[in-house]
Image: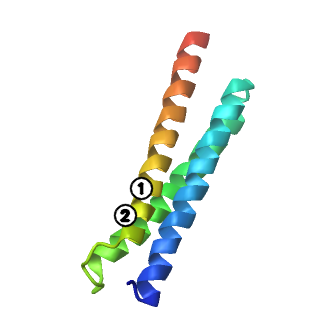
């Protein structure tokens, strides 16, 4: 079982990754509504939150924290991975639409 420090770090990863995923999904909605500027703002926000989650994860790797992998940590990293996938997909869709518009 995680100690309170580990649990706090894991929950931070989940929080930042979940927020990043929501921003990326909102970017898709803005793309669908031809609001590319708003989509780009959401993607900037998504990327910043992904970076925050990565920073917390990096802290896990560099600090003297129990090296045992927990199910909750795996769950947190799954959230982070999904957020990155949605973010990248939204960026690609936006780039495709912008190229078609030229």
Residue 102 seen? no
Above or below, comparing residue 21 to residue 98 in the picture: below
Image position of 9 (left or right of 18): left
Residue 20 seen? yes
Above or below, comparing residue 58 to residue 4 in the picture: above
Comparing 22 with 69, the one in front is 69
In percent of the image, x 42 and y 55: which residue is there?
78
In percent of the image, x 69 and y 25: which residue is there?
32
- Labelled disc at residue 78: 1
Comparing 96 with 17, the one in front is 17
| SS at circle 1 | helix
Point out residue 73 in the picture as x, y percentages from the top left corner: 39, 69
Q: CA distance from mark 1 to mark 2?
A: 6 Å
The answer to which image quadrant residue 56 occupies is: bottom left
Point out residue 19 in the picture as x, y percentages from the top left corner: 61, 57
| SS at circle 2 | helix
In percent of the image, x 27 and y 77: which residue is there?
62
Residue under label 2, please give it: 74
Above or below, comparing residue 102 to residue 90 in the picture: above
Residues at marks 1 and 2 touching, judged by CB atoms closer than 8 Å: yes
Image position of 51 (left or right of 29): left
- Labelled disc at residue 27: none
Point out residue 96 in the picture as x, y percentages from the top left corner: 52, 19
């Amino acid at each position: 079982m995680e100690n309170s420090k580990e649990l706090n770090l894991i929950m931070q990863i989940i929080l930042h990754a979940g927020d990043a995923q929501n921003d990326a999904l909102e970017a898709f909605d803005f793309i669908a509504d031809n609001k590319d500027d708003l989509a780009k703002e959401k993607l900037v926000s998504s990327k910043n939150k992904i970076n925050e989650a990565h920073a917390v994860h990096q802290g896990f790797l560099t600090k003297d924290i129990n090296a045992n992998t927990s199910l909750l940590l795996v769950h947190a990293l799954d959230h982070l991975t999904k957020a990155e996938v949605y973010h990248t997909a939204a960026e690609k869709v936006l780039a495709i639409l912008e190229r078609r518009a030229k």
